[in-house]
Amino acid sequence: MSVTEDTITDLLAGYLRDEGIRALTQISDTYPSGRSQPDWEIKSGGVFWGEAKWESSKWQGFGEARDYGQLPGASGSFLISYPDKLKQEGIQRGLTGDITESSLADYKYNCAFLRRDETTDMATLTLEEIPQWIKENTEERREAEADTDQVVDVLRQMARRLNEELQSAPEENLFRNVLGASTTDEEEAEAARETAGFLLINQITFYRVLSSNFEQFPELDADELDSPRDLSDYFERVLEKDYTPVFQFEIHDDLPQSSLDVLRDTIKSINGVSPERINHDVLGKVFHELIPKEARKKVAAYYTKNEAADILTHLAIDSADSRVIDPACGSGTLLASSYLRKKELLSTEFNAEVHDQFITNDLTGIDVMPFAAHLSCIHLALQAPIYETDEVNIGIADSTELRPGLSVNPLSFVLPESSEQRGLGDYSSGQSPDISEEKIEAGSTTLDAELGSTMELTTKDLVIMNPPFTRGESVARFSPDYKNKLKTRFDRRDQKGHLHGKMSYCSYFFFLADKFLEEGGRIAAVVPATVLNKKSDNGVRQMLVNEYDVEYVFAREDEPNYSEDTDLREVLIIARKDNTHDSDSGTAFVSHDGLDIDIDEIQTLAETTETGNSYNGNNFTLQKISLESLNVNNLFAPFLLTNRELNTCWEKLANGFELTNLESLDVGLIRGIGSNADGIMHVHPECSLNDPAAHTFGERDLFVLEEKSSDHVVARHRHTDETFTIPREDVAPNLRRYAGQKEMDLSDSLEYVVLNDNWDGAERYLELTDEDSIHYKWSDRVHKRRGHVALVRRVDLTAPGTHHLAYYSEENRLFNELLWVLPNATRQEGKILAAWFNSTFGWLQSFLYRVETRGAWLTWYRYIVKEYRVPRLSSLNEEDRERITSTFDDVKNAEAPSIYQQLALNTDPSELSEEQLNDIEEAYDGLTEILGGGFQSRRELDKAILDAGGVEQQDELLNELYRGLLYEIVSLKLMMD
């Protein structure tokens, strides 16, 4: 049987009749709307006509159902959407009348009930729930509810359909409307193409809301449109009142005439959704979520989570009169939350005058991308849609060049030079805008539509922001011209030494915020955690510690982020400008599990808890730390451990040694082979002769080591099996990848790297690669990066292929760029340092010194590694040296399981709580089964270190260490997953 909409409709109608509902199908009449027939007719408390659609085309069903509901004699109409899976699975399952219920019962159906001038009721229902839902709507007139997910899904279907119609649109127009810039980046171009239809849907939907509230905006009648361009007649009426960031984009002008029917259907379907009757909080969520995540990510449009915004505004806004600016306003979440917080603090009645004060004076938003300003404008206006909004204080500009006293035109946006950071252009304030002719040549300033009201920038009480930190976040990647402009714009900070060529782009927004604040003003920000401990961002920390009271820092335990759709570790910061520091009230460091936390309780505790103390609340822990105790090099340190007892473990070890920093040992420090600014080849995989039993191979790993002797090695091509005999002086030992390396001693590793092409057979060797030659500087680069010991520079500590954090080699070995090489260390020094950093105490230190980047990846920068605490080698007596090196020799070739498995094998399960056991099993399926199984090499190495330090009660200390560090890694994995 062919499975069609009619097939399902007839079967469902039979089921409904069995449930007492008079449901007719295959209606034969022709109706005035011009449609051939409804799919359903139900007579119960009135006449209700219905439409059936597959889920993938339900957007059209809303328009058709709405048409039915407008007909004379209609009491209402409805839509039932069938899952697309039924098209295929239905055939296989044999849809026949006698098994209707069993055939359809496994699915859920999106349903909508429409009444003229009333809210559209939406629900996702099982088969058994549909009859009762119909009865409630036809007989009892149940209270209608809007389903956010369904509304978003329907609007997305419409937008994607419009995107298909926009395929022939001039790309330059799309780029201008979405990005505010020309672009040569294909990912950004694709984002513009994907987003344009969504902006048009936003415009039509928002117009529907406005026209339902204000008489001066006539209802948009789809049947009256003769051309897509006729939408201008409606939108221009709104532009006369402003809402410029919403309606300035003339995307409809790019629709071909052949798109008219699709546009009409779209308008009717939007009207069928009845957005004007959806609660404004829900509707705000719809606009917030409408543009798909993937399209947003391509242009770095990461939205702040609503709960995170509420935390910031609750703690940073203490007056209904507060003046707020968001210099990277995105979708407007932070501004909308600020609006609601100010409204909450009102001592008088909220009315149209207050709304106007908030929107046109108190709240200011700036963004470099037009579509972001578009969303912010909608988000703010929806906070009180019943009140008319003449002006919305949203501007489009590069915020980094702004300061109090300048003015911004809300209509302006920039087509930046292609050599500059995309989306970060030059808005020239104070110039008379030329709107006589649109100019789009590179570097020009373009002013579209009608000239809007000028925004005069003034100082504020709060700068709230989630500044851009993705896609070229390092200023080192910007063009020299743009970097120079940033130095000029923040010259005062440059003179203080606060700027750094590799600082995160988001860090400049802290310096920008400072310009807009007077004494007592606040910064409230969502930023990457690296701002708190990355060396290049030290200038920001210096400003915050010396010129501000850092009141709060928040970090999550359950997830890494406060923005949507990113796996970057983020923090919340609230700081009050205070150049005097008359009193040290301390900083509240709050780590919390989930976003459902009591902000009032946290605020009270932050104000009453003495510095040096901590408090465990419901889903949060608050530590109060004094200014003098803050480590300006690592303000993230209070969050690095959930188990504070591990600090004690480290201190017990440290007390047994004379420790110094690694830099003082004079063993050198250089990054392994990798990217190089001078243009010499990078890792050059074609030069690698890999171990034939390697953990993994890449596409460019062409050769494996066939054999080696004292005077030559034999390389074999993996695909052709050709072999090459290469003199030993023309190769060097190599570590291509550390992942999967189970032995910490690489001395017997069968990996080499070819140094040059001066040996017999090199010409044919190169013919089998993508290289014409081996660069003459390659050999020198290799030799500079060889050593007996190397420390991991970047790693996923939670991964099953991570076995060690340091590696040793009897021969000087080349290491890859994910490791730090200590080229001057002797063999004995190399063994001692490899033992130290591969001990569990070394792991703990690395965990404490880590910088979290994306996901579970941890990084240790050069400035961090130089400060690693190590034994002063000259202070170790011969007995201790021998103890450590001999133990190292005993365990160096042990095939170690992953780091987390080594810890688990040495952790007694009886010392773990039930909650911890559940977390361990959730993070690593089956890991609880090996708890306490023992891995003796790990314990032997740790005891050798403890013996050298004269530390007593070793078993008790190690048990605490294994158990605690295992759970830290488990917690990290659960959060990052």
Image (cartoon, grey):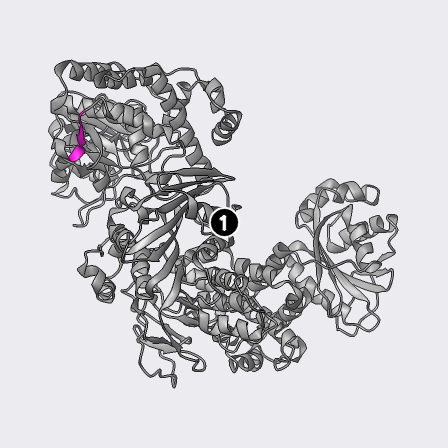
Q: In which image quadrant can residue 779 be found? A: top left
Q: Nearer the viewer, residue 170 or 248?
A: 248
Q: In which image quadrant can residue 440 be found? A: bottom left
- Relative to 448, is 648 on the left or the right? left
x and y, in percent, of residue 880 in the image: 17, 16
User: Is residue 839 highlighted in magenta?
Assistant: no
Q: Nearer the viewer, residue 952 or 919?
A: 952
**In terms of secondary structure, where does tag 1 sit?**
helix
Q: For the residue marked with disc 1, what is the amino acid?
A: Ile
- Relative to 200, is 785 on the left or the right? left
Badge 1 density bin: few <14, some 14–19, many ≥20, Cα 10 Å: some
x and y, in percent, of residue 352 in the image: 57, 74
x and y, in percent, of residue 52 in the image: 74, 58
Q: In which image quadrant can residue 35 be found? A: bottom right
The number of discs equals 1
x and y, in percent, of residue 658 in the image: 17, 25
Note whether residue 804 is visible: no
- Relative to 679, is 364 on the left or the right? right
The residue where tag 1 is placed is 599
Q: Nearer the viewer, residue 844 or 835?
A: 844
User: Is residue 662 highlighted in magenta?
Assistant: yes
Residue at 50%, 49% (x, y): give it: 599
Query: What residue occupies the far bottom of the structure in this picture?
Result: 436
Note whether residue 593 is visible: yes
Point out the stretch of residues depicted in magenta: 658-663
- Relative to 643, is 731 on the left or the right? left
Q: Is residue 27 above or below residue 692?
A: below
Q: Nearer the viewer, residue 552 or 958?
A: 552
